[in-house]
Amino acid sequence: MKVIIAKDYDDMSEKAFGIMLETVKSNPNAVLGLATGSTPIGLYRNMVRDHRENGTSYKNIRTVNLDEYAGLEGTHPQSYACFMRKNLFDQLDIQEKNTNIENGAAKDADAECARYNALLEEMPRDIQILGIGSNGHIAFNEPGTPFGSTTHTVRLAESTIKDNSRLFDSIDEVPRAAFTMGLKNIMQSKKIVILANGANKANAVYGLVKGEVTERVPASVLQLHPDCVLICDEAAASRL
Ligand code: PGA
């Protein structure tokens, strides 16, 4: 794994944007694997600014997102579908039909997972953006998730519910379950860029880069990927 230590959040976001721009410029039909959470917001801001200032086009770009809360409609303000429209899609020239995310409101969870897995088979990712949870999760693959997993539903770990409660009015409103791409789906991306900032990510980043490759730390599977880049700020890199 290549490790790039950035000065701070803005520098991390700039560096991630550089890699994203290279992907989009070299292939205007690229498939981008995208993530939600606070970490990639700076990257998305750079993409929007560049689109406005330099006209980089996303007209033929297709996207697949990692995960979605179960039980939330895509119109719910805390849904990841809504997050993506607000922070990225609505500000680019991307076609809505080319953006994909699990349907959080699906009544038949197994059918929804099967649909998403079939979609992922048809859309090999050129790049996958990832954040990392303080417990070492990637997407909603919590500790103990098999490396061979594909899209599935999960009960969220207590630490994840607590971490994500800052975005809701109260912790009781945080959904307890989610749909997530599995670790096998994530590993199929040609290139992976994982981002981390802040001291609360330092232990997870240590496990990602230097720890044992174990299902107890889902992110550690990335040590086995042939083209994975970690970009983190100094605080997140403090244990490396
Ligand atoms: P964050 O979440 O970007 O909001 O820190 C990361 C994650 O849980 O994957």
Image (cartoon, rainbow, N blue to C red):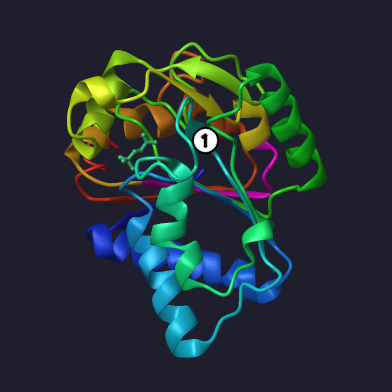
Name the image quarter holding the C terminus.
top left
For the residue pair 79 and 139, the one nearer the viewer reads as: 79
Image quadrant of ligand 1 equals top left
Q: Is mark 1 within 8 Å of ligand 1?
A: no
Magenta span has 208? no
Q: Residue at x 51, y 15 (%)?
A: 215
User: Which residue is under mark 1?
Assistant: 67
Name the quadrant containing residue 95.
Answer: bottom right
Residue nearest the observer in this picture, 233 or 111: 111
Q: Position of residue 237 (x, y in %)?
A: 27, 43
For the image shown, how many numbered marks are present on the structure?
1
Task: Please provide the residue range marked out in magenta.
Answer: 187-195
| The image quarter in which residue 150 lies | top right
| 4 w.r.t. 144: above or below | below
Q: Nearer the viewer, residue 115 or 228?
A: 115
* Residue at 69% in and 74% down: 26
Q: Is residue 55 visible?
A: yes
Q: Residue at x 42, y 26 (%)?
A: 137
In the rendered view, does 119 fall on the left or right side of 1?
right
Residue lying at 27% horizontally and 19% vertically, measured from the top left: 159
Residue 124 place in picture, x, y as percent: 75, 47
Image side of residue 199 versus residue 217, left or right = left
Question: For the view shown, which residue lies furthest in the bottom direction?
Answer: 54
**Which percent across, then down, holds residue 57?**
60, 79
Question: Residue 193 lies in magenta, yes or no?
Answer: yes
Q: Please, what is the three-letter code of the amino acid marked with disc 1? A: Asp
Up the image or down, 78 lies above or below 49; here it is above
Disc 1 packing (10 Å; few <14; some 14–19; many ≥20)? many
Kindly tell me whether residue 214 is visible in this rendering.
Answer: no
Give percent across and percent down for residue 3: 42, 49
Secondary structure of residue under mark 1:
strand
